[in-house]
Amino acid sequence: MQLDAKIPTGPIQDKWDSHKFNVNLVNPANKRKYEILVIGTGLAGASAAATLGELGYNVTVITFHDSPRRAHSIAAQGGINASKNYHGDGDSVFRLFYDTVKGGDYRSREGNVYRLAQVSGDIIDQCVAQGIPFAREYGGLLDNRSFGGAQVSRTFYARGQTGQQLLLGAYQALARQIKLGKVKLHARTEMLDVVIHEGRAVGAITRDLVTGEIRAHSAHAVVLATGGYANAYFLSTMAMASNVTAAWRAHRKGALFANASFTQIHPTAIPQSDDTQSKLTLMSESLRNDGRIWVPKKADEDRPPGQIPPEDRDYYLERKYPAFGNLVPRDVASRNAMTVVEEGRGVGTRKNGVYLDFAESIDRLGRAVIEERYGNLFEMYERITDENPYEVPMRIYPAPHYTMGGLWVDYNLMTTIPGLYAIGEANFSDHGANRLGASALMQGLADGYFVLPYTISDYLAPLLGTQIVPTDHPVFAEATQDVHDRVHRLLSVNGSRTVDSFHRQLGKILETHVGMSRNEQGLQKALREIPALREEYHRDVQVLGENESFNQSLEKAGRVEDFFELAELMALDALNRRESCGGHFREESQTPEGEALRNDDDYAYVAAWEFTGVDEKPNLIKEPLEFEYVALAQRSYK
Amino acid sequence: MNITLRVWRQENPDASGRFVEYDTPDIESHASFLEMLDIVNERLTEKGEEPIAFDSDCREGICGTCGLMINGLAHGPQQGTATCQLHMRKFNDGDVITIEPWRAAGFPIIRDLVVDRNSFDRIIEAGGYITVPTGSAPDANLIPVPKPAADAAMDAAACIGCGACVASCPNGAAQLFVAAKVANLNLLPQGQPERWTRVEAMVDEMEKHFGSCTNHGECEAACPKRISLDFIAMMNKDYVKAKFKNRRMAGQRG
């Protein structure tokens, strides 16, 4: 198979405009003749469904949440980037593009990233008009803050709840379309398979999580906006229900899955406190604006932080990276935290964290300013740890947080299955091997509001006049039966171990071997352990209850089953990439100073994998990456 | 710590529910309340008993999915805290803890501790938005918003739509939820063109699903985001004003 990313030709600043001119259009009166199925109602899904509805398409939207307002986009705290240059500090579309390509360690597509930077300003305009209460200066204009990996201030924010506010904006736009009848919503409904007919995506099979009804939906095109898969690690900052099932089912039906091992381990989560913990909680990266990260110089330090004098503290990021200091990109910050903890210099009773200290900022700015900027985060921290961060430094440690990998898509955001699109975190496209802070919200909304609604018409226009495949067609009956069989297989194992116990064990394997630091031997080991555990899962999992009821164990069982297959691909992808880049750190490939060392000659490509069967080795298909505008260089934040 | 749970179990919306007691030993005090329930569910599953159904997702107090009545209080004893952020250290060894679903006619029970809050979505659909089709917005800084107005709008917008206000209200009223969204949008310059229709449409939809407000103030006390009762006053004022406003003059200032 040859991959065609369909990047338009011409100068980078003209690619998107000329592409928009060249794509097929569907005229306004004809849009109502099309059915589009959108799966997921996070930032990408809700904004896409709302916009497609506004344009006149008939949209059906599916969410496993009880309401479209709940998706995990809501938990993003710090902000959203845009190259508005409202603060006159030298920002531009090109600089945001450049920072994003560099931040991603040169493993993303220039064309896609440039487009992302181009539409970033439109997102802010759109969201302000929707009534998002972004932070303001006293003159009434928009305020900005700085984020990791950038030397300009380009991050727009709504206190520590930016994701929530942006999601509610998209949800409200979606609600308007639901009221107008352009969008049909199915809440508490999970997609369990995509339906392919004559090589095209023609619909999906869903399960109603309340009644268990398994149902077919037919459409001209299917859009997956189903988020990332960091929950494969069990302990992550993701929401409990976040999963890979929709994307994985599409992968099994032929959609290539790209860069599966590119996961982001976020530097500022609260360290694990006990062994029965269900998830990790993130503290916004924005805290690194005013907090200083340090650990004791000595491994056997036992004084409380306030009594450790400055000469016995190691502000290791400021020491090693004077130019960016505490604002180095996430992968760099995380790996350094791991290193100092491995040296035995970790803090807290489990010695599993580093300090993030606000004492100096509080002295300089006053407590009121810090409270205004981060009050809700400090409160959240105190609720979880029972420690007051105004008085005692926070303890933080990296946690799986975001997945740059995902379904392979072309410039139109279409997967390798015609008619099947992937947007937001579910695709692999814009962040390369490491995502910069405040760029997830930007990408989700760029895809949903400003990219997909244009590009989808290119596929739909030639289908004018064709009817959707009726749901009583054998292709739907067959897919429905498959889902039915799978659900009943899980229910009939009747083993001795809970779904969570398997998931926790799988997560441990991934954390150990496919986490912040990876090596040949560990990855080989993971590739032996994962299939063995999966086999045990199929033999010994205990899923109680029945399909025809509200059954949360059954929901989890299906998701974990897919995590097993994904986990194997994550390890395989990491093994294949014998270089370090961004969040993917291969111990065999590092500079003398211990920084990630890329190998551009051999690995400047997107690794897209084709499913060939469970227990079969997937095919690797390479999409070479070409850099015309950003010179490939060793990333330096010194 | 060792505790005893009294949990509301109800197989489906039509079944009659009952309290079931669970002895729950060996819980770590830094476990969160929902992690404690996870452990109880693991133990139940291992014994072959169906686990307790409860909703949660982000577990960091922002998605609004979780919500339990704990000892008769919506989201439990800690002020300004969603159920998922409550930790066992707020309880004592030997405690008997009663756990119920949201109690409100507007939120029918689906199973055990899970309720249906779709009526909230219907209220937002009725008018909880600013009409601005994608792509039609002017440059963001063309609309200056005075900082106090932006801050107040944000105070209101912090609502997570969990429904604790309804569950804690003796009347099962949803005024605090609705007022928060009305204020979020009506306080901002961008929200002015639809200000009067919005408040009317949302209040009218609310009244189809929920009880009436009699100013008890339980909602504010239960709200995990500490949304102020002042917003209800603001909504009521806008609702009354809307009845007198000549919409053809809505473009005039002052």
Image (tube, rainbow, N blue to C red):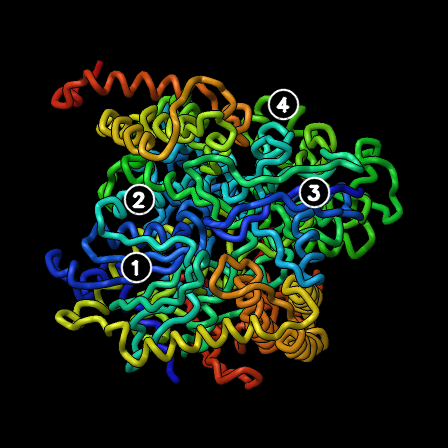
Pointer 4: what residue?
Answer: A367
Name the kind of residue labelled 2 in the image. Answer: Ala
| Quadrant housing residue B2 | top right
Please name which of the two marks, 4 or 2, marks the residue nearer to the observer.
Answer: 2
Residue A150 appears in view: no
Pointer 2: what residue?
Answer: A175
Image disc number at residue B200: none
Name the kind of residue labelled 3 in the image. Answer: Leu
Task: Say what secondary structure mark 3 lies in.
Answer: strand
- What is the quadrant of the C terminus of chain B in the image? top left
The verdict on a common chain for dots 1 and 4 is: yes
Pointer 3: what residue?
Answer: B5
Q: Give above or below for A201 relative to A453.
A: below
Please name which of the two marks, 2 or 1, marks the residue nearer to the observer.
Answer: 2
The Cα atoms of the two marked residues, 4 and 2, are separated by: 40 Å
The verdict on a common chain for dots 3 and 2 is: no
| Quadrant housing residue B50 | bottom right
Q: Give above or below for A339 relative to A492.
A: above
Task: Say what secondary structure mark 2 lies in.
Answer: helix
Lower position in the chain sequence, tag 1 or tag 4: 4
Q: For label 2, count other residues whose C-alpha is less than 10 Å away and answer few (under 14), some (14-19) or many (20+).
A: many
Please name which of the two marks, 1 or 4, marks the residue nearer to the observer.
Answer: 1
Residue B124 appears in view: yes
Residue A103 point in image, percent of width and height: 51, 56
Residue A545 point in image, percent of width and height: 57, 63
Give the chain of mark 4: A
Q: For the point 44% across and 42% down, which residue is it?
A: B108
Pointer 1: what residue?
Answer: A452
| Residue A65 located left or right of residue A554 | left
